[in-house]
Image (spheres, grey):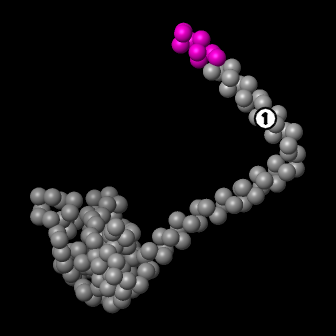
Amino acid sequence: MNPGNLLHRLNEWLDRKTVEGSRQLARQSSRRSFLGRLGTAIVGMSAVPLLPVARAFAVDTAGELGNPKSCDYWRYCAISGTLCSCCGGTERSCPPGSEPSTIHWVGTCHNPVDGKDYLIAYNDCCGKAMCSRCSCHRTEREKPLYFPSRHASITWCFGAESRSYHCTMALVIGTAD
């Protein structure tokens, strides 16, 4: 059988089925019911973008125990730098006048409150002079320098407007399954 002829027959069949389906839909529904269903679908879909945002906040605020200004805080198991929580920011945000780097390193830390392991993204905050309070160097399960994407002793301010290191924050990005 000629492939061109087969394609032509397939197109005819698809056209016929589309026309039959459209006529069947027109016989069984009115414009008003169609518009009502469309409106319900649009309103229902408007709530969909809110779901991931709510989940992200739930992960980051899950069971906190300890002092974020102490090196022993559970999120800081793989940190190397100055804590932003001691320099005018928090463990989740850069201090005013600094900006987060666009790249980060990741550690897996155990939360003693819920007994789960979490992936923590360590972002350097850049653009101000280095803060000299609360310096921490915890490198549990750190890889040697020859594997730079897993090494904490590198300034990660490459993608920021200024390469001047100020402090480091620790963001929960999810559970380690």
Residue 147: x and y in percent read 15, 58
| Foreground of the two, 123 or 62 | 62
Amino acid type for the residue under numbered disc 1 = Ser
| Whole-percent x, y for residue 97 in the image | 39, 73
The residue segment tinted magenta is: 1-9
Q: Give the tally of numbered discs.
A: 1
In the displayed structure, does residue 148 sit left or right of residue 56?
A: left
Magenta stretch encompasses residue 80: no
Give coordinates of residue 60: x percent, y percent.
43, 76
Q: Circle 1: is it few (<14), some (14-19), or many (20+) Cα within 10 Å?
A: few
Whole-percent x, y for residue 91 in the image: 36, 79
The residue shown at (36%, 86%) is 113
What quarter of the picture does the N terminus occupy?
top right
Residue at image location 85% in from the left, 43% down from the top: 28
Q: Which residue is mark 1?
A: 22
Q: Is residue 39 visible?
A: yes
Q: Is residue 112 left or right of residue 96?
A: left
Q: Nearer the viewer, residue 46 or 88?
A: 46
Mark 1, secondary structure of its residue:
helix
Which residue lies at the image location 41% right of the left edge and 84% below the top edge? 63
- Main SS class of the magenta portion in the image: helix
| Residue 48 falls left or right of residue 130 | right
Say whether residue 98 is visible.
no
Above or below for 110 versus 107: below
Task: Check the picture and name the quadrant holding the C terminus.
Answer: bottom left
Q: Residue at x 82, y 36 (%)?
A: 24
Give left or right: position of 16 versus 83: right
Please tell me which residue lies in front, 162 or 123.
123
Question: Residue lying furthest top in this view?
Answer: 2
